[in-house]
Image: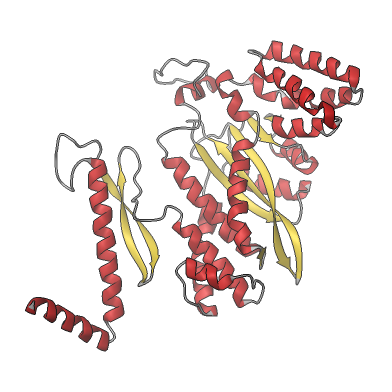
Amino acid sequence: MAHIQSAVSDLFEAFRSGEGVDLVRESVRIVLQELIESEASAVIGADRYERTPERVTERNGVRWRELMTKAGTVEVGIPKLRKGSFFPSVLEPRRRIDQALYAVVMEAWVNGVSTRAVDDLIQALGGTGISKSEVSRICAALDEEVGKFRTRRLDAIEYPYVFLDATYLHVRDDRLVTSKAVVVATAVTADGRREILGLDVGDSEDEVFWRGFLTALKGRGLRGVRLVISDQHAGLVAAIRRCFQGAGHQRCRVHYARNLLALVPKAQMDMVAAVFRTIFAQPDPESMSTTWDQVRDQLAARLPKIAPHMDDAKAEVLAFNTFPRVHWRKIWSTNPLERLNKEIKRRARVVGIFPNEASVIRLVGMILADTNDEWVTDERRYLSEGSMALLYPDRDNEPIAAITDGEA
């Protein structure tokens, strides 16, 4: 009992001398670090420097991460593993996204842009008020991290499949609220992993903007592109043809189906959609091409304007079928990128109107950086290493497992 009273007295004395905040912050850091180390040992099957029969992997250094707490910002070390990945359950996997969201909303608030229940949001994110200088400090740190992510080199590996798409967010520009395009590029690497290549913000999706974005990616070392998957926006398609000469262009089959149904009376939409899907159920390029022509003739007999529409689109909508069959479902649409855009929209909905383009890049950049970290450390590849070897038959590859039609 005397020991406890002594400890309490020491704590009160630390607060009187102004050292109490540092003491609490360090205590929080120590507790968090111990929890992380304990969980890591359970995953590994052994403590640090311990050898046991249950060990399934080994530690391979540590990555440092800043964490915002009620006691202030603390830095903890997350063990890296030689096999597999580890992220402690006591931490939020997307905490730095919350920090970016916090900074963006506060920047808007400080500048009088957003007034919608900002106090509740700040409290939910762990804040109690912030000064302009603190906003600037947080934003500068985040912008530096996003800048490194956006400008990193891409020449370490080839990217045979590249996905391009855009979403629109509201941004205040010279006191006017405008809708601006946020463009994102993702890719599949030569070893089958997904990666986010870059992002940018522009007034519109015209050819000049897209060409500048794609040229910047190539300037960072993007190479080995075999197929670019996107919608049929005129500016984007023109930029792809200019920047990726020799690569194929896959027009997203989902986007095309919507465009096709726009030509069809509502009563016949279900029938047309069902008939159109039969094209993609075919087992090889030849039968797929034949079925496309049959569907075209069948629909044109009832709706003549469909014929030229399908004739113009055939080559680009079926571009995927010249690649390995096990890849078809993963490369015939931009659906994977659409899911990423939904996450961007979900986070951006809290902000409503961004105060400037820099704040858009800050928040979206953090979302993409965290997502990219998850992708590159995921044990499961987007496309199997064995199926990716089919793209490079002339290269010397190590023996790989047999590939079946169901494997991707």
* Residue positioned most to the left: 2
- The quadrant in which residue 378 appears is top left
In the depicted view, which residue is nearer to us: 388 or 382? 382
Question: In x, y percent, where is residue 59?
Answer: 25, 45
Which quarter shows the N terminus? bottom left
The reply, left or right, for residue 55 in relation to residue 171 is left
Q: Is residue 17 visible?
A: no
* Residue positioned most to the bottom: 16
The reply, left or right, for residue 164 in relation to residue 55 is right
For image coordinates 68% across by 14% down, the residue present is: 285
The reply, left or right, for residue 56 in relation to residue 361 is left
Question: In x, y percent, where is residue 346?
Answer: 60, 53
State whether residue 163 is above or below residue 384: below
Question: In x, y percent, where is residue 278?
Answer: 71, 18
For image coordinates 88% across by 24% down, the residue present is: 308
Q: Is residue 381 visible?
A: yes
In the depicted view, which residue is nearer to us: 322 or 266? 266
State whether residue 96 is above or below residue 285: below
For image coordinates 71% across by 67% down, the residue present is: 172
Question: In x, y percent, where is residue 179?
Answer: 74, 58
Count of all numbered marks drawn on residues in the image? 0
State whether residue 96 is above or below residue 116: above
- The quadrant in which residue 178 appears is bottom right
| Picture colour scheme | secondary structure
For image coordinates 29% across by 86% down, the residue present is: 18
* Residue positioned most to the right: 304
State whether residue 166 is above or below residue 190: below
